[in-house]
Amino acid sequence: MVAQLREEVTHRLQAEASLKESEARLRHLSSRLLEAQEKERKRLAAELHDELGHALLTIKLQLRALARSLTRSRKRWPRTSRSCSPSSTACWTTCAVCISTSARAI
């Protein structure tokens, strides 16, 4: 009976030690997973920031160039396009043609 009790205690102690070891490995792997996720988030954020920043700067420069071109070419626009009603289809068509012409000049 004592031998059986000793064997049971030994078995439980081994199981407990194995469980503690498994928990430690799980904590370690969880920690590494969180570190990898955070590293990937930072990499992705930096990549998006760089690409988006470049794209926005390009758009800004293109809009600035278009604005300068439109300002220079406005004198060449038909007089009707300068004073037409914003709800007029003809006005929008004329403006679209003028903008298209100015854009090609850039």
Image: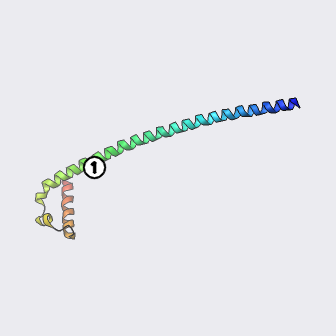
Q: Residues within 10 Å of mark 1 (few under 14, many from 20)?
A: few
Left or right: residue 8 compared with residue 32: right
Total number of numbered discs in the rendering: 1
77 or 25: nearer the viewer: 25
- Identify which residue is drawn at 18% across, 65% down: 94
The residue that disc 1 covers is: 59
Q: Quadrant of the N terminus?
A: top right
- Identify which residue is drawn at 18% across, 56% down: 102
Secondary structure under badge 1? helix
Rendered image quadrant of residue 5:
top right
Residue 13 percent location from the top left of the image: 75, 31
List the single residue furthest toward the right: 1
Residue 4 percent location from the top left of the image: 86, 32
Q: Amino acid at mark 1?
A: Ile
Above or below residue 50? Residue 102 is below
- Identify which residue is drawn at 59% across, 34% down: 28
Residue 3 percent location from the top left of the image: 86, 29
Left or right: residue 50 compared with residue 61: right
Rendered image quadrant of residue 49:
top left
Residue 77 percent location from the top left of the image: 13, 61
91 or 10: nearer the viewer: 10
